[in-house]
Image (cartoon, rainbow, N blue to C red):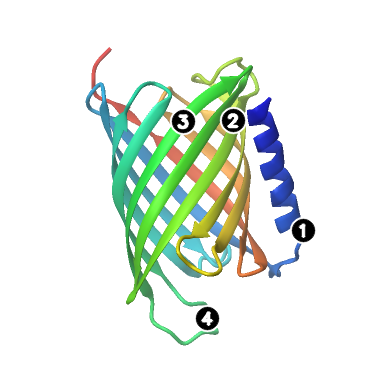
Amino acid sequence: MKRITLLSCLLLFSMEVFSQSLVNNEVGGWLMFFNRTRFHEKWSLHTEIQDRFYDVSAKEEQLLIRGGLNYHLNQKTWLTAGYGYIESYPPDDVVADKIVEHRIWQQVMHFHSIGRVAFEHRGRLEQRFVGDRYRDRVRYRLMATIPFNNRLMQPKTFFGAIYNEIFLHQFESSPYDRNRFYTALGYQFTTGTNLQAGYMAQNFSGKTKGYLQLGLTSNLYLLGK
């Protein structure tokens, strides 16, 4: 019941945040690829590439390449540490150079289920070297996934996903950075591969912008059967 209450509070917060108008009614694009390669009973590698666009006509906004090393405490809890390289590009009406960010990050993930619904909690710390500026940030994401045509997630399963993630600056007078609310439909092709297509509303600097997202996850398991 406490977990359901937490999810409800996050959803209500998101509705309040995203009741504001979308920025110029523009919709951006967001392509994502994720991989987790399990090479040991306790260890796996995380890699991802994300390419974000100001609008669907492909004016590039940001490129993110991130990697990490996962330690599996057990089936329900993972610890990760890694590095990310990010390039951010100015919009057409702004004369500025791209901004390069080097990001060190640590996170903990915890998984559990209530009936058919699978929940994922993700807490992340980030040490960000943005251009010539240093910033600390903390993030928390609560995600729920529900299969439609099978009781549990397995190959040949259609599913829905929803999450809310809040970003807060540490050690700053104004801690709020942004909030993301995401909904998607997906298909699980195999145990390790799925495709999701969805919509994200991101609130930042008091404004909200929407993104159409397409994400491919393809994991590898190298331990044999």
Give the quadrant of residue 11: top right
If you read the primary sequence from the N terminus, does the residue marked by circle 4 or circle 1 appear first?
Answer: 1
Q: Residues within 10 Å of mark 3 (few under 14, many from 20)?
A: some
Q: Position of residue 98 (x, y in %)?
A: 38, 76
- Gap in angstroms between the C-alphas marked 2 and 3: 14 Å
Name the residue at 54% across, 39% down: 196
- Gap in angstroms between the C-alphas marked 2 and 1: 24 Å
Q: Mark 4 points at which residue?
A: 92
If you read the primary sequence from the N terminus, does the residue marked by circle 2 or circle 1 appear first?
Answer: 1
Q: Residues within 10 Å of mark 2 (few under 14, many from 20)?
A: many
- Name the secondary structure under disc 3: strand
Marks 4 and 3 in Cβ contact (< 8 Å): no
- Gap in angstroms between the C-alphas marked 4 and 3: 41 Å
- Gap in angstroms between the C-alphas marked 4 and 1: 27 Å
- Name the secondary structure under disc 1: loop
Q: Where is residue 187 in the image (x, y as percent from the top left)?
A: 55, 30
Spot the residue most to the bottom.
Answer: 95
Name the residue at 43% across, 84% down: 96
Of circles 2 and 3, the one toward us is: 3
Q: Name the residue under label 3.
A: 110
Q: Mark 1 points at which residue?
A: 19
If you read the primary sequence from the N terminus, does the residue marked by circle 4 or circle 3 appear first?
Answer: 4
- Name the secondary structure under disc 4: loop
Tell me which amino acid carries mark 3. His
Q: Where is residue 59 in the image (x, y as percent from the top left)?
A: 50, 70
Left or right placement of residue 152 versus residue 51 in this view: right
Q: How crowded is mark 4: few (under 14 residues within 10 Å), some or many (20 or more)?
A: few
Q: Position of residue 169 (x, y in %)?
A: 48, 61
If you read the primary sequence from the N terminus, does the residue marked by circle 2 or circle 3 appear first?
Answer: 3
* On screen, residue 223 above or below 135: above
- Gap in angstroms between the C-alphas marked 4 and 2: 37 Å
Tell me which amino acid carries mark 2. Thr
